[in-house]
Image: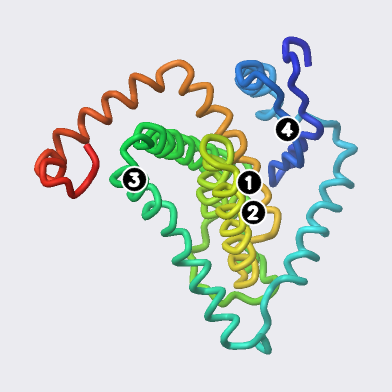
Amino acid sequence: MTGIRKTRIMLLYLSRRRLYILSFCLCYHWEPLLAALTTVNIYAAIANNAILPACLGTEHIMMETLDQSLFLWINATPDSPTWLLRLAALTAKDLILIVPILSAIFWLWGPTGQMKVRRQLVVKVVIAVAIGLFLSWLIGKIYPHDRPFISGIGYNFLPHKDNYSFPSNHGTIIFTFALGFLFWYRLWSGIALMAVGVAIAWSRVYLGVHWPLDMVGGFLVALLSCALTQLTWSVCGVFIYRRLHQLHRIVFARLIRRDWIRG
């Protein structure tokens, strides 16, 4: 692709039913990637399913087969231990709460000298998650893909509405959160949260509400949303942070005066 310096997209696969972005590498600049993704020719190709030649039908079948094989290997069965099913259900439904809880802690409390860094991290992560969920919704509308229990494959142990599965919203949220800490805070915290993300991804495949590649898609959407957030922050991040900080001091003025939370 001309005009994309220092940016490599190793494989982009668009099929009739699903968008596969198997891997990509971003180097140094976010702007060229954004320009490439918003090119009229790309949108025209998406609209016509013409990004890659029709000969990739074989690869599409191979990816679907791989996805189903991985799902059946991970998916629980009626013979699975009850304790493991309960643990998976707890992980799948409730572990995602670490995102709002940790965000609130980082915004409201902490060492005085670190509050600006911590709050800027929270703002960046919130923006990235919002972008990620929008991209996830958009991809789901353009390339809808049924959940395993809708397709009649495997076993389902977690009640879920029959909306489209790719990419996973849970995967998008937790991986965006983890990558935010990895990129913009401390390496060890990002790695720890990435482990949480892997646990959530496993549990939702194990319980039968997602395909494995739904989680891969969520991770890749998270990468892209962090890239777009970094670009957004370079343009108006300081302005956004200042306005939110002013709003915080107004809304929580009484608690700040009592030194219950940081000002």
Q: Name the residue at 61% across, 58% down.
A: 195
In space, the residues marked 2 and 1 are separated at their CA atoms by 6 Å
Q: Which residue is mark 2?
A: 215
Q: Does residue 231 sit above or below 18 in this rendering? A: above
Mark 4: which secondary structure? loop
Task: Say which of marks 2 and 4 sits in front.
Answer: 2
Give yes or no for contact between labels 2 and 1 (Cβ–Cβ under 8 Å). Answer: yes
Q: Which residue is mark 1?
A: 219
Q: Amino acid at mark 3?
A: Gly
Q: Is residue 259 visible?
A: yes
In space, the residues marked 3 and 2 are separated at their CA atoms by 33 Å
Give yes or no for contact between labels 4 and 1 (Cβ–Cβ under 8 Å). Answer: no
Task: Say which of marks 4 and 3 sits in front.
Answer: 3
Query: Looking at the picture, how far across and down is residue 53, in whole percent?
Result: 85, 31
Give yes or no for contact between labels 2 and 4 (Cβ–Cβ under 8 Å). Answer: no
Q: Which residue is mark 4?
A: 49
Q: Nearer the viewer, residue 231 or 130?
A: 231
Dot placed on the residue nearer the N-terminal end, 4 or 1? 4
Dot placed on the residue nearer the N-terminal end, 4 or 3? 4
Mark 1: which secondary structure? helix
